[in-house]
Image (cartoon, rainbow, N blue to C red):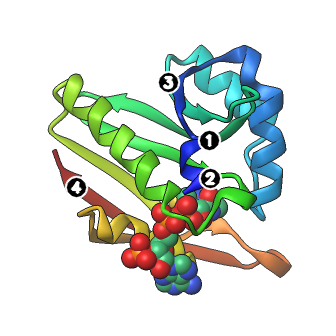
């Protein structure tokens, strides 16, 4: 409850937030996005939104790319101390609000086959698996891991 209360400030993120985002990115992902990935995303017009705590530190964020009437979810993360408390669901609610506000028809995402927690959050939010991209992600010891492609109509 306390953690949810401290996710009160929600808004758009930009270049000035990249340092803050990278700290989380490197904490929560085995294969984090680089500074260049975020810079390129913003330069390409992709949008990022997130929650801040009372000290204005970012604690959760997502990045989306617009593809015609479909929104492609490129990144979705909750900082480690805030995970497992329903905050993923709160972030998802904001994603849906954004998609509805801009009248998108659907949201598409890819997720590692092994990422059971993220898949649970997506399924609970109404996403369904529509396919597999074989060997889409790098994995340990030069292996590759499949991506599950999921979509939800808005
Ligand atoms: C994925 C992520 C955003 C979810 O955020 P979160 O705040 O932990 O999620 P929530 O607390 O809202 O919900 C977690 C759900 O997963 C379930 N869950 C947790 N661990 C699980 C596991 N190992 N297997 C299956 N379900 C699991 C919980 O039971 C909960 O479901 P419920 O609401 O039905 O009880 C967060 O864990 C994260 O940032 N992970 C690292 C980055 C990442 O992998 N992002 C997704 C990239 S595609």
Q: Nearer the viewer, mark 1 or mark 3?
A: 1
> Dividing the picture into quarters, in which one does residue 28 lie?
bottom right
| Direction from residue 43 to residue 125 in the image, left or right | left
Q: Position of residue 72 (x, y in %)?
A: 38, 41
Q: Are marks 4 and 1 in contact (CB under 8 Å)?
A: no
Marks 2 and 4 sit apart, C-alpha to C-alpha, by 28 Å
Q: Position of residue 24 (x, y in %)?
A: 77, 47
Marks 1 and 3 sit apart, C-alpha to C-alpha, by 26 Å
**Precedes in sequence: disc 1 or disc 3:** 1
Marks 2 and 3 sit apart, C-alpha to C-alpha, by 28 Å
Marks 4 and 3 sit apart, C-alpha to C-alpha, by 20 Å
Is 4 rendered above or below residue 44?
Answer: below
Marks 2 and 1 sit apart, C-alpha to C-alpha, by 5 Å
Q: Nearer the viewer, residue 146 or 93?
A: 93
The residue to which callout 1 is attached is 6
Q: Are marks 2 and 1 in contact (CB under 8 Å)?
A: yes
Within 8 Å: ligand 1 and the Cβ of disc 3?
no
**Precedes in sequence: disc 4 or disc 3:** 3
Q: Secondary structure at mark 4?
A: strand
Q: Position of residue 130 (x, y in %)?
A: 25, 68
Q: Secondary structure at mark 2?
A: helix
The 10 Å Cα crowd at callout 1, few under 14, some 14 to 19, many 20 or more, is some
Q: Secondary structure at mark 3?
A: loop
The residue lying at 73 percent from left, 45 percent from top is 33
Q: Quadrant of the N terminus?
A: bottom right
The residue to which callout 2 is attached is 3
The residue to which callout 4 is attached is 152
The residue lying at 80 percent from left, 77 percent from top is 140
Q: Nearer the viewer, mark 2 or mark 3?
A: 2
The residue to which callout 3 is attached is 46
């Amino acid at each position: 409850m306390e953690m949810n209360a401290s996710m009160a400030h929600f808004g758009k993120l930009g270049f000035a937030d990249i340092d803050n985002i990278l700290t989380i990115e490197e904490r929560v992902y085995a294969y984090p996005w680089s500074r260049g990935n975020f810079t390129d995303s913003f330069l390409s017009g992709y949008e990022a939104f997130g929650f801040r705590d009372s000290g204005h530190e970012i604690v959760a964020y997502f990045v989306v790319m617009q593809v015609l009437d479909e929104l492609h979810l490129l990144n979705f993360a909750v900082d480690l101390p805030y995970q497992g408390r329903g905050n993923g669901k709160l972030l998802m609610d904001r994603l849906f609000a954004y998609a509805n506000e801009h009248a998108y028809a659907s949201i598409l995402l890819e997720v590692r086959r092994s990422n059971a927690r993220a898949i649970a959050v997506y399924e609970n939010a109404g996403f369904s698996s529509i396919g597999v991209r074989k060997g889409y992600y790098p994995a340990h010891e030069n292996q590759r891991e499949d991506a599950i492609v999921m979509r939800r109509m808005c």
